[in-house]
Image (spheres, helix red, strand yellow):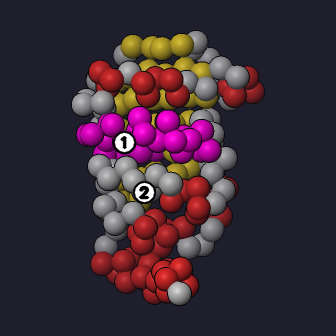
């Protein structure tokens, strides 16, 4: 596994200032802290299938230039988010444009306190078939539709 940037221990409070990224078997990209510049490395765009973003602020992940780069990862199927200051559905919805994703994991984020999180993911991310390790089934889609189609009605008025 190749490393980029400074290697720092997880749990270190200086993570926000510094960062670290590594690639494993050319398929899994780990990004810690302030290391999003690794998204500019075009040699990863056609190989990375899984990405872990840990202690990376979500507002930086969805900042337009970064989001545009994320969309270039054509084989990205699985995204794992943890410790990202992700606290709203509106923020989360900004990654729904990553159409290659079929698996989403969210850990250690405030948004997990929302009872309707799974339904929101099911409703907004039509291409996702696994959330936090559980398959998304037709029953989930039905519930999600019941809980969230009211928002579509409100928005279309």
Percent x, y for residue 80? Answer: 46, 44
> Over which residues does the magenta segment extend?
58-80
Label 2 with label 1: CB-CB less than 8 Å: no
Q: Which label is found at residue 143?
A: none
Residue at 41%, 35% in the rendered image: 69
Q: Is residue 71 magenta?
A: yes
Percent x, y for residue 91? Answer: 58, 55
As helix, strand or loop, the secondary structure at mark 1 comes to loop
Q: On the rendered structure, is 79 left or right of 6?
A: left
Mark before the other along the chain sequence, 2 or 1: 1
Percent x, y for residue 81? Answer: 52, 45
Does the rendering let one see residue 91?
yes
Quadrant in which residue 1 is drawn: top left
Q: On the rendered structure, is 29 left or right of 150?
A: left
Reading the image, the residue beneath label 1 is 71
Residue at 62%, 44% in the rendered image: 59
């Amino acid at each position: 596994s190749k490393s980029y940037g400074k290697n720092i221990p997880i749990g270190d409070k200086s993570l926000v200032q510094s960062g670290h990224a590594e690639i494993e078997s050319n398929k899994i990209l780990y990004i810690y802290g302030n290391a999003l510049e690794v998204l500019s490395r075009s040699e990863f765009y056609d190989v990375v299938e899984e990405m872990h973003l840990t202690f990376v602020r979500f507002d930086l992940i969805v900042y337009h230039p970064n989001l545009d780069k994320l969309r270039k990862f054509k084989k990205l199927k699985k995204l794992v988010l943890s410790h990202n200051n992700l606290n709203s559905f509106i923020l989360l919805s900004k990654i729904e444009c990553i159409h290659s994703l079929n698996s989403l994991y969210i850990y250690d984020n405030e948004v997990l306190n929302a009872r309707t999180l799974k339904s929101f993911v099911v409703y907004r991310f039509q291409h996702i078939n696994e959330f936090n390790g559980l398959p998304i089934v037709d029953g989930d889609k039905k519930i999600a539709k019941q809980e969230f189609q009211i928002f579509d009605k409100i928005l279309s008025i």
